[in-house]
Amino acid sequence: MKPFAFVAAFLLPFCVIVAEQNRNIIARGSYANSQLQFEKNKTGRVAFMGGSITQMNGYRPMVGNWLAKRFPKTKFEFVNAGISSTCSTTGAFRLRSQVLAKGRIDLFFIEFAVNDDQDAGHATRECIRGMEGIIRQARKAQPNMDIVVTHFVNPGMLEQLRSGKMPLPMAAHEKVLKAYNVSTIFLAREVADQIDAGKLTWKVFGGTHPKPAGNAIAAGMIAQLLGTAWSKPPVKDTSPHAVPWKPVDGGSYFNGHFLLPEASASTAWTWHVPDWKKIPGGVRSNPFAGKKLLTAEKPGKETILKFEGRALGAYVLAGPDAGTLEVSIDGSEY
């Protein structure tokens, strides 16, 4: 067991120890495309998608700092597509506008295990459809994109792992990752292993939203995965990743995207930024509260959205002035 030198680059007052041969760093596929882009072309666009664990000042900037130090002559652009309390289903539908629309993505980091568990309460089917919706859509749009998925952990998942059980979202996500040959950083099991070995406590790790110590473990495992993958000289040309002809679940959301509803002709529903200061109560300010929202102030007023497909969802902002939506599709009952 040796402390890795790259941990010092995080400028943290502690040392992270991860086994050199680690069952929780599951390497699949190749990362030669991103290596070539970073080493030879000297530019890189790296995207991160997940819930609040990604959105917060945690593992994401640590990984960004490590990449910048490993490739000091490379100009990086980092995309933060983390949104608190959102699950993999949401990710599949917002991928196109919030990640792919940024341009070529060389390296893509994803985490949704915790959100699929505690926020969405997804069954296996929904966990698969969300994660596959992200990965299949990403690989179809940009076949050269390298991807890493990290399983973070909450207290319930930790107890399951320590008792020898696999948490449902992680098991479901792994079905997708194996099918698409995408690497896993099994941080959740690493935390369980270190706690069982007496090398870590949940308090030191920091909880569901890890403290710097916990985030450094995640970033260190990612650095080990990529450092090993990039230890050989870069290839001469990029190579597309294979995409399975048949999806794991034919109902996965790999065609997911956003639609923009229209305000009703009667002006009962309007697009505007609510004056939140005049509305009693609290509201999450990031990232939607400063944007125009489609709103109605009188009960029973209707608006229409035209769409084609098998699934439809809506972002409904949680706050003091929220209401209840009733939906009718193709003339069905509300």
Image (tube, grey):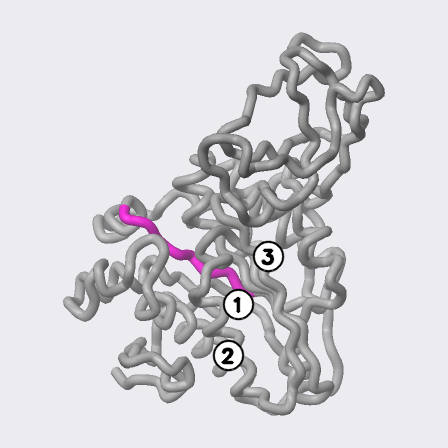
Residue 71 sits in quarter = bottom right
Q: How busy is the neighbourhood of tag 1: few (under 14 within 10 Å), some, or many (20 plus)?
A: some
Q: Nearer the viewer, mark 1 or mark 2?
A: 2
Disc 1 or 3, which lies upstream in sequence? Answer: 1
* Place of residue 87 in the rendered image (x, y in percent of width and height, measured from the top left): 52, 44
Outermost top residue: 333
Gap in Å between the C-alphas at discs 1 and 2?
24 Å
In this rendering, the answer to whether 319 lies above or below 219 is: above
Residue hosting label 1 = 28
Name which residue lies at 58% across and 49% down.
287
Q: Nearer the viewer, residue 266 or 193?
A: 266
Name which residue lies at 39% across and 61% down.
186
Q: How busy is the neighbourhood of tag 2: few (under 14 within 10 Å), some, or many (20 plus)?
A: some
Gap in Å between the C-alphas at discs 1 and 3?
24 Å
Segment colored magenta? 148-155
Disc 1 or 2, which lies upstream in sequence? Answer: 1
Gap in Å between the C-alphas at discs 2 and 3?
17 Å
Q: Amino acid at mark 3?
A: Ala
Residue hosting label 2 = 65
* Place of residue 325 in the rendered image (x, y in percent of width and height, measured from the top left): 60, 20
**Horizontally, is 100 left or right of 31 in the view?**
right
Name which residue lies at 21% across and 49% down.
163
CB under 8 Å between discs 1 and 3: no
Q: Amino acid at mark 1?
A: Arg
**Horizontally, is 125 left or right of 15 in the view?**
right
Residue hosting label 3 = 81
* Place of residue 243 in the rendered image (x, y in percent of width and height, measured from the top left): 69, 57
Q: Nearer the viewer, residue 141 or 68?
A: 68
Q: Amino acid at mark 2?
A: Asn
Outermost front residue: 278
Q: Is residue 152 magenta?
A: yes
